[in-house]
Amino acid sequence: MKQYAVIGASTFGKRILEELILLDCEIILIDKDPEIIEYFKNDVTAAYIANVINEETVTRLIPADIDAVVIDLGDKIEASILVTQYLSKLGVSNIIVKAETDQHGEILSIVGADHVVFPNIEAARRVTPLLASDLLFNYLAISGGLVLAETGVPEGLAGYTLIETEIRRSRGINVMAFRKGGQGDYQFFKPEYRLNGDDVLLIVGREEDVAAFTGKNIASRKRGIGKLFSQLFNNH
């Protein structure tokens, strides 16, 4: 059975912990907040109230052959760097750490983090495109510049089949599935199906192609937001 540890149950660490509890695995939880330990103690294999600044504490509670350790010490940047270094010296092979800034992430990588996570940045990257296009409903960067997105049907495509639109050839967009009228579950296209203006499409493409397909215009939206803020402040 796999064994994992969560050191620090701030927002990110807590979410990871909640997901791990659903799996068939052993979980070690370490946090200095007694309320957190009390809340999760019956759901994990072992729960410790401890200050992980002390290297001896970390090496005593975390086995070197553990499958992975997740570190989320909130905004305690120095502490997360020290704990990462302790685990690296111990020989832990999979150290996942939440970073607060780019510089923090760079240092974490240097001292031994195998994976550095930027939840705030990732959340911003997902939300910002939604502000920039009225057609985008969900947006997820995958890798290598590829994006998975939920989008409405752009103007001019309604009434045509996918073959007739030539979306893949002309726009670099792969349409995976659709929800008719934006309702119900996703379904695959039949060759004869004609797009409706209220359909929701599940698409994959390069970031720039998805932006062009959905009419995303960050510059103009920024001007609009700037005007709104100006009005708000002038009114006060």
Image: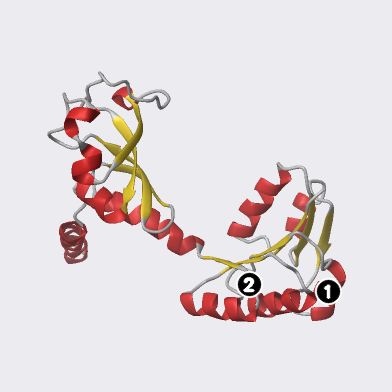
Residue 218 is labelled as: none
Q: Residue at x 19, y 58 (%)?
A: 228
Nearer the observer: mark 2 or 1; the answer is 2
Q: Secondary structure at mark 1?
A: helix
Q: In the picture shown, does residue 183 fall above or below 134?
A: above
Question: Quarter of the image holding residue 92?
Answer: bottom right
**SS of the residue at dot 2?**
loop
Q: Nearer the viewer, residue 96 or 236?
A: 96
Residue type of the residue flagged with mark 2 = Ala
Instruction: Estimate the x, y position of residue 127 in percent, counting from the top left.
Output: 36, 53
Residue 91 pos. (x, y %): 77, 73
Q: Identify the amino acid type marked 1.
A: Thr
Please indicate whether residue 213 sits to the left or right of residue 91 in the image.
Answer: left
Q: In the current view of this chain or complex, which residue is farthest to the left? A: 156
Q: Is residue 214 visible?
A: no
Query: For residue 194, what is the image quadrant?
Result: top left
Q: Residues within 10 Å of mark 2 (few under 14, many from 20)?
A: many
Q: Residue at x 43, y 52 (%)?
A: 142
Indicate the quadrant containing the C terminus: top left, top right, bottom left or bottom right: bottom left
Q: Pick whichever, 194 or 81, lies toward us.
A: 194
Q: Residue at x 79, y 80 (%)?
A: 54
Question: Is residue 152 positioned above or below 42 on the image?
Answer: above
**x and y percentages locating residue 226 in the rendered image:** 19, 63
Is residue 31 visible to the viewer in this orientation of the structure?
yes
Q: How many neighbours does mark 1 have within 10 angstroms: few (below 14), some (14-19), or many (20 or more)? A: some
Give the quadrant of residue 197.
Answer: top left
Sequence-wise first label, 2 or 1: 1
Numbered circles on residues, count: 2
Residue receiving disc 1: 59
Q: Position of residue 168 (x, y in %)?
A: 25, 40
**Residue that label 2 marks:** 113
